[in-house]
Image (cartoon, grey):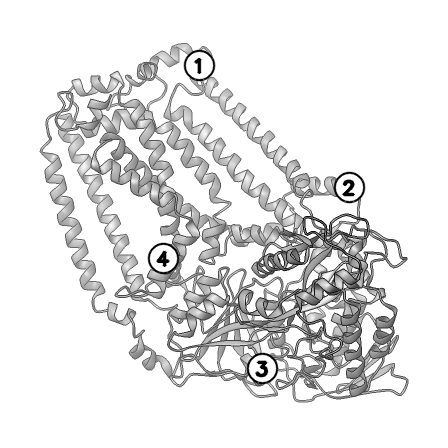
Amino acid sequence: MTAASTPAVVREPDGGPVKSGPSRGVLARAAAGPKTAYLLYVAGKLGGAAVSLLAVLVTSFFLFRIIPGDPVKAMTRHRPVSPEQMAALRRQFGLDSPLWQQFTDYCGKALTGDLGVSYQFHAPVSQLIAERFPATLLLTGVAVVIYSALGLWLGTRSAWRHGQLGDKLNTGVALTLWSVPSFWLGLLLIIVFSVGMGPIPGLFPTGGMESGSETGFAHVLDVAHHMVLPVLTLVAVGYAQTLLVMRSSLLDEMGSDYLTTARAKGLRDALVRRKHAVPNALLPTVTMVFINLGHVAAGSILVESVFSWPGLGGLFYQAIPVPDLPLIQGLFVVFAGAMILMNLLADLLYPLLDPRVGR
Amino acid sequence: MDTQGTTTGTTPHSPPPHPARPRAARRLLATGAAVFALLATAATPLSPAAAAAPQQPAVQAKAKAAPRTLTIAVAQSVDSLSPFLATKLVSTSIHRLVYEYLTNYDVKDAHTIPALATEWKSSPDKLTWTYKIRDNSKWSDGKQATAEDAAWTFNKMMTDEGAASANGSFTANFKKVTAPDPTTLVVELKKPQATMTALDVPIVPKHVWEKVGDFSKFNNDKDFPIVGNGPYVITDYKPDQYVKLKANKNFWRGAPKFDELTMKYYKDGDAAVAALRRGEVGFVQGLTPAQAASLKSEKNIKVNDAPGRRFFALATNPGAKDKTGKKFGDGNPALLDPAVRKALFQSVDRKAIVDKVFQGHAVEGQGYIPPRFAEYHWKPSAQQQIAYDPAAAAKTLDDAGYKKNADGKRLGKDGKPLDFRILCHATDPNDKAVGKYLTEWWGELGIGLKVECLDSVSDRWLAGEYDLAFDGYSVNPDPDYVLSIHTCAALPATPDASGQTDNFICDKQFDGLYDRQIVEYDKARRTDLVKQMQSRLYDTGYMNVMVYPNALEAYRTDQIKSIKTMPEAGGNIWGQDGYWSWWSAEPAASGDTPDQDSGTSPAVWIIIGIAVLMILVIAFVVTRRRSSTAEDRE
């Protein structure tokens, strides 16, 4: 804790912790100058991300070829199909060429953004993903933002007054909801707030993203109306992780000397918390938030299922049993890519949050 | 560390209680109360409408102008709206509604009746079929549907691989298709084919489809409305969400009673049931027994428990081999002994399976084709039947020389205990439940059973790596396909290839009957041959039908007044062989359905209220922060 306090004392309220550049001490130690150091850091991270992405591209091709099951056989089971038709399908899917050729074809196309054509939907994978991505982004994005903010806020309060009734209640409720299966909570919400129960009227639709008959602002409201229950489910089940991480990292900071100093200056308690303790405790939580943002692309298969949300999670779920190789590969690349991108963003943001990073 | 954190207001380190805090709290409370009051007043006049009697006055006011819409829940997402590519049931059901086929199946007993073709005849050599095409069917864009459209559709499937993806098997035996005039279609065959009145191929408008380039990638989902000539026309489609259809007022058989039909995709069965209770959808299919039971007592909901078109059978591996006779797989050779198979089937208590596993929603199995298809359904005679009789099963094994050892296990001819494996679909709870019963029943017989539940059984199955397997097929009004999968011709060409075969059965006598029925154009004689084939299949004892599962579905009687089931007496609604259900469905008396899912409902106002509240709270917090910072700086 004492180590952490050294650079933190430079964070005076007038400076503003986020906007302030590296402190004088940091400047002195960064021999090549802060800009060059940051650029080198950025270049390193960018390079790492590029290598990861390439690895993902290659892995996705081989990983899913291990899944047992011949797509052509699986797709033609239980319906009349002649051997000629099966051969034609194999040709159409490119499954008749040797594996190395399939791989080079895939790599060549993937680099130009062409992820192939889905076996079962007969449409380009990029198109299928583009059709469903906004829905997933909207649902999980809104949920992640809300539960991160909520977790951050409640976590800070809990840590600051840890051991008190409020903290126990807070953590208790969060942990209980965290351990609730999301599909079960979703169904309960549907039964109570969609169908209606006792005095509670059925207020929200049971599923889907829109009723399909509205335009303009009414459409926006309609989508918001459809979003309430799924977002509520995701937030209820998800905010505990941000809360707990924030709580524990803030607790770590709370014994620090710089807080005593801040108080000695006569700062109000809320200000000590907001301007001194929280910024230093934020790093693990930021990592967590970005990991969650990385998960946004993958959506939530279970919540998307319960609320029939037309997102990527459902698409992945439909692709696996076939196995619809181009679709699985494409989705895997998008999911992993989003994760890599968000990790990269988090890495790039760290030096701004904490000057010690990236020196 | 602890002392600092726990007692904010009292430790010497903390600043004295700031006057801003209680003031802030008061301000927050006041704002909250004000907003809540505002919200409550806004919501009160609206909330009764949202409660139990849903929007009745509003509905009646709208009734005259609003179209009568029926929304039904479907459990699959559409794979393609192109009839040349679609294979999922939801998509083919939609195609039934939007394109006419040459023939249709009677709603009463599924016998072939006219559709786009009004009559048909075959030449004496059985190789030429001539269809008369009706002159009163118009495409939804106003053009006449003719024999030329039908000929073009078939020719496209015969010449373009992409267009043969879904239904190519129907034209595999076609030599030449022509349309000498707008009402005559002539199909020349390579070999006689008795299924020429069961060509389930949607006929598409040539003038629209001849512009399509690559049939393997064209999904027919961009230009709405999609030109068709069935009882409905597709007007909108959102992937993974819904398909909207509009009644075709010019449909030759008569316009449907509902103006619009929306098929809404529900990924979760329980959510679909909730939507039915709420009135958001008027129909739900694929119910579990528990769901059906919970809906039975519900007001305005009718549960339909009808005979299904599937059979649920035990398949035993007859020794997998390819067309050349090359053996592969690892089926237990003990199962090649008819006595062993007979003993296994004799200890299957079908009644228990119907009662316990299907909770009464199934019919005990006998012949291969379900009783729903009354014409072709066959029952074993009293002498032939392998009835449930555990004592007789034990005797069968004793007589055949499979004695029990000291542990009570039956020993095979090789002296090792009889232990079998059964392939089970991990996604099917019925497989798992029946598996438990079989383990118990066969255990009593002295035979061990390992139930192997896999997400995908097809690889193991096609490789012949199973002893027994849970098997099931949906049967069509024409039984040719489900019979063809047990012929030698359906075996794979090589062990790596996959044939059409279901269970590697290759029996000369069965094949002989099959070859006779496919060229038999006389209905009565063909029916007789089909029954003989089922009898032979039963006797060979590699396929044993345990039950015919029912189709469980439910609809709202306050939305649907009446609807035709198929078979008409006690049949089902979803996945019929024809468009009868949705074509015949009549709206309930109110003339409209509670429009729960659109319009600015009270809930929307509540959302707006919550949003306003959130903005106010945020604004409040921000102003408070500013002021407190200013105070601190002083």
Q: Residue at x 40, y 86 (%)?
A: B589
Whether the residues at callouts 4 and 1 have beta carbons within 8 Å, the answer is no
Instruction: Say which chain tag 4 marks.
Output: A
Residue where numbered disc 3 is placed: B580
Instruction: Identify the mark nearer the N-term, 4 or 1.
Output: 1
Q: Nearer the viewer, mark 2 or mark 1?
A: 2
* Mark 2 or 4, closer to the camera: 4
Residue type at mark 1: give it.
Gly
Report in which chain the residue with disc 1 lies: A
Name the front one of labels 1 and 3: 3
Q: Position of residue A83 (x, y in %)?
A: 81, 61
Mark 2 vs mark 3, CA separation in Å: 50 Å
Residue B49 to residue B120: above or below: above
Q: Which residue is mark 2?
A: A101
Examine the rendered structure and indicate whether residue B489 appears above or below residue B249: above
The answer as to whether the residues below labels 4 and 3 share one chain is no
Q: Residue at x 47, y 18 (%)?
A: A37
- Residue picked out by circle 4: A189
Q: CA distance from mark 4 to mark 3?
A: 36 Å
Judged from the image, the secondary structure of the residue bearing numbered disc 3 is helix
Along the viewing direction, whichever of A90 and B631 lies nearer the viewer: A90
Q: Which mark is residue A33?
A: 1
Which kind of residue does numbered mark 4 sit on? Leu
